[in-house]
Image: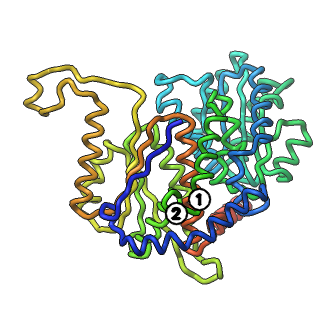
């Protein structure tokens, strides 16, 4: 299996080597805690690192997938938001392409992740059309707490549709993914719905390798074993106490170094449209994990790194001027990938008058030239960056990348002295929303 390649040097990352070594060495105690957590299952805050090796969980998910495939549904609708669906979307987009006519999964999958009436209405129309034709539709409602306002509201809409068109077997076409013992779990068990449990100490943004992501991804024929094998490979290497071999410790140390030097924006610049949704998943991981009002001792610190996502080459025509000429307040991770297809330009020599030196070349070589040109420009302008290459867009490499980034953020939370597992300010808006709804 091929492994992702993380490239950096002190010059292009704009770091002091001695400072970096000292910062990385601070992580040894945290690395030991995570290694200890591997022996404690789901009993610690580091519970998510146990997901890739949980064969019992995988077997339960695959058994339910087999059962629900017997219904031969034409559509899967994932009803969830944030950590309940961003990881699933990221893996799906990376492996199935960004257009359905690019590579059709066995069934179409839609994500009901907002209470935007127009967007939701489009999905409802599609689902109702399938039901009117007598086809089955599978609804996977995903909410860790079982009480997420948007998710429960959307689920009610689809439940109502199923009850209308499939009164005799609508329960068979619903899978509930939630914490065991949550209000939704208890409801599902009481009325005979299929339920998948999320380990309690696995937070939503760390849950892509739990039933949250595994059920819908396996249902559309993503190779779950390869995905988890890639993640497990990274768990092993990123819990190494040999810092030079620990990608998560290294990347966390780079981000922390620049945070200490007032560079508090991190741009993930992705030169692959298929991987763009991974950038959106990472954006939530960074924001919720590190954006904290209080440190671990309860002191007000208002810490955080602002994550942005850029798409190459598209966004070079909108943000490159700012990134290369504006404030030096950003650290960039460039992500490139080997494409699945090879497209060769025709040899129109008279087109040299428009753009020279591209005739007869592959589109991917032009992408490579652009990405290399961008890195050279960043180096000349002393804009700090590191590079990641995905040698093959497959389950193993995607599993590696996601697990690497989750461990990176856990280590960075330790360095910043904040809790990377809670999200108290998110709960504030949820509380206020419930008050608004109560008083309407």
- Residue 48: x and y, percent? 69, 54
Disc 2 to disc 1: CB gap under 8 Å: yes
Image check: 61 left or right of 296?
right
Vertical placement of residue 353 versus 263, above or below: above
Query: Is the residue marked by circle 1 packed among few (<14), some (14-19), or many (20+) residues within 10 Å?
Result: some
Image check: 241 left or right of 97?
right
- Depth check: 110 or 321 in front? 321
- Residue 347: x and y, percent? 17, 20
**Secondary structure beneath disc 2?**
helix
What is the total number of numbered labels drawn onto the structure image?
2
- Depth check: 158 or 281 in front? 281
- Residue 390: x and y, percent? 44, 41
The residue tagged 1 is 240
View extreme (top): residue: 133
Mark drawn on residue 50: none
Examine the rendering and report whether any part of residue 125 can be seen: yes
Classify residue 37 by image quadrant.
bottom right
The residue tagged 2 is 243
Residue that appears at 71% across and 64% down: 435
Q: CA separation, marks 2 and 1?
A: 7 Å
């Amino acid at each position: 299996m091929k492994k992702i390649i993380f490239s950096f040097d002190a010059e292009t990352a704009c770091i002091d080597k001695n400072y970096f070594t000292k910062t990385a060495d601070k992580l040894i105690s945290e690395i030991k805690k995570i290694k200890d957590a591997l022996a404690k299952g789901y009993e610690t805050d580091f519970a998510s690192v146990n997901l890739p090796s949980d064969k019992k969980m995988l077997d339960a998910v695959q058994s339910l997938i087999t059962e629900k495939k017997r219904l031969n549904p034409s559509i899967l609708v994932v009803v969830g938001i944030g950590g309940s669906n961003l990881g699933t979307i990221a893996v799906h987009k990376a492996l199935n392409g960004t257009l359905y006519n690019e590579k059709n999964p066995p069934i179409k999958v839609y994500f009901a992740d907002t209470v935007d009436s127009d967007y939701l209405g489009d999905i409802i129309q599609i689902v109702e059309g399938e039901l009117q034709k007598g086809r089955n539709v599978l609804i996977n409602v995903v909410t860790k707490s079982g009480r997420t306002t948007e998710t429960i509201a959307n689920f009610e809409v689809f439940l109502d549709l199923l009850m209308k068109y499939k009164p005799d077997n609508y329960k068979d076409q619903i899978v509930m993914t939630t914490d065991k013992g949550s209000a939704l779990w208890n409801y599902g068990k009481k009325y005979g719905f299929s339920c998948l449990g999320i380990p309690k100490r696995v937070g939503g943004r760390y849950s892509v390798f739990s039933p949250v992501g595994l059920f819908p991804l396996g249902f559309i024929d993503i190779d779950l074993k390869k995905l988890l094998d890639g993640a497990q490979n990274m768990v092993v290497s990123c819990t190494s106490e040999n810092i030079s071999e620990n990608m998560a410790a290294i990347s966390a140390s780079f981000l922390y170094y620049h945070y200490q030097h007032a560079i508090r924006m991190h741009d993930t610049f992705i030169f692959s449209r298929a991987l763009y949704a991974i950038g959106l998943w990472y954006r939530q991981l960074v924001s919720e994990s590190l954006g904290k009002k209080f440190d671990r001792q309860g002191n007000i610190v208002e810490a955080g790194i602002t994550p942005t996502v850029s798409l190459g080459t598209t966004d070079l025509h909108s943000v490159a001027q700012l990134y290369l000429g504006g404030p030096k307040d950003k650290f960039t991770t460039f992500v490139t990938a080997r494409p699945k297809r090879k497209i060769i330009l025709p040899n129109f020599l008279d087109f040299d008058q428009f753009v020279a030196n591209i005739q007869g070349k592959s589109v991917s070589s032009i992408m490579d030239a652009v990405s290399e040109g961008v890195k050279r420009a960043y180096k000349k302008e002393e804009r700090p960056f590191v590079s990641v290459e995905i040698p093959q867009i497959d389950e193993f490499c995607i599993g590696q990348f996601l697990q690497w980034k989750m461990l990176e953020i856990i280590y960075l939370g330790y360095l910043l002295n904040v809790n990377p597992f809670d999200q108290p300010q998110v709960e504030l808006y949820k509380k206020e929303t419930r008050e608004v709804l109560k008083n309407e």
